Image (cartoon, grey):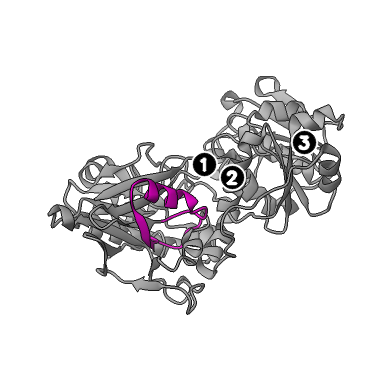
Amino acid sequence: MFLRQVYDDELAQAAYVVGCQQTGEALVIDPERDIDRYYKLAADNGLTIVAVAETHIHADFVSGSREFSRDPNVTLYLSALGGDDWSYSWPDNTTSVRYLRDGDKIMIGYVEIEAVHSPGHTPEHLSYRIIDRGGGADEAVAIATGDFLFVGDVGRPDLLESAAGVAGAMEPSARTLQSSLAGRISALPDFVQVLPGHGAGSACGKSLGAIPSSTVGYERRFNGTLKLAETSTEGFVREILSGQPEPPLYFKRMKHVNRDGIQVTGGPPQAPKLNADEFVRQSKSVTAAVLDARPDRRAFAAEHLEGAICAPMDGSSFTNAAGSFLGVEDTILLILESERSLDEALRKLYRIGLDNVAGWVTFEELKAAGVPMTALATVPFQRFDPNRLPADSAVLDVRGSSEFGDGHVPNAVNAPYTRIAEQLDRLPADKQYYVYCASGRRAALTSSFLEAKGYKTVLIDGSGDEKFIPHVA
């Protein structure tokens, strides 16, 4: 049996290629949209992809199943258990698809994949027990848990409400998740490997571990949220619904895209190289959105093209900025540090369904052409005095609401940066906003977005815990 994790560091997302080395067949679980990576991995190991399975309708990336559906050699395996609202609607009569229920089995050569209904994160969620029949096993070696069970945490049950807008879904989903965890995990032996759908940094949980896999036995002993699910329904519900990070705005669009379908393109878009004059001309279009992807946010703060949004190719900043601040209607222009980062930027946009990229240029080419630049007004946190601000100003805290609840600058307004694009009507345009977070990273992204929207901002850079006071409701 062949088993390989394919990990996306930006989205902290894990797909899995499971193969039978005796027959040369392979299955991909939870692929992202740029599927060439999985074909290459399979081919490099003498395998042919014949099947794709999804654990659930994803919220944080565009699934690659739609792209795989155009391969006549591939059969899709999707959940049949989403009910009227969360069942796949995009497969048509040209799609080779089989809908799975609890206990259904897939054979990939001599490797058995058994669907395990594990609802709570979403109603249709499936996990997959993997049994190496060709190796003589009659018990599972691993279970691919998607967003059901993570290393050190469990999936969040609030996204149907907090991201997709399904009112009243949060608490019932939490109770369903508790029941699933208590029932499904208890039936598995300690030695079974846990293959999670995400790792640390994903917005699909709040305390995910940074190691790529675990075992059922280890999680039973050390995963506090799982232990709570096995011992206290009410305690679990309270814990799992508290302190979850605000999901980026693009999550709602992803849920609908993955349920209803997206255009098949055959791969990430290509983007033309533009000269400085053409780039600046296109940037002035009302539909243009300029993403400055240079990795150093402080270099952006010091000098950037007017109207550009800070979206560093560093950690999750690029995807979170693009997904939180842009929509499919925007025509994207990229400012890069060098051409070497072009493919990575295009793939990251493609994975969240942002395909309309009109062109790119390097920052140094803009500078060499004499294009005028601007800067973000900036003050270090240690020199920021919230008691001595101009009358027409306000302090904006762009951390998560749970962080804000733990303490904040006096009289600050909380607007988590991943949701701020839908909250602009709360922010009068005639004020100057002093913007802070915990380090300056999120504040830099937000300040650039607000400046692009015509607001006046001052970026408060660095950490300022000593200036925080406890939240008073």
380 left or right of 305 in image: left
Residue stretch rendered in magenta on the structure: 30-59
Mark 1 is on which residue type? Glu
Q: Which mark is residue 319?
A: 2
**Picture residue at 53% right of the left edge, 38% below the top:** 403
Q: Say if 36 sits above or below 397 in the image.
A: below
In the depicted view, which residue is nearer to us: 303 or 111? 111
Dots 1 and 2: beta carbons under 8 Å? yes
Q: Which mark is residue 10?
A: 1
How far apart are labels 1 and 3 at the CA level? 28 Å
**SS for callout 3:** strand
Mark 2 is on which residue type? Thr
Q: Residues within 10 Å of mark 2 (few under 14, many from 20)?
A: many
**Picture residue at 34% right of the left edge, 59% below the top:** 177
| Residue 116 lies in the magenta stretch | no
**SS for callout 2:** helix
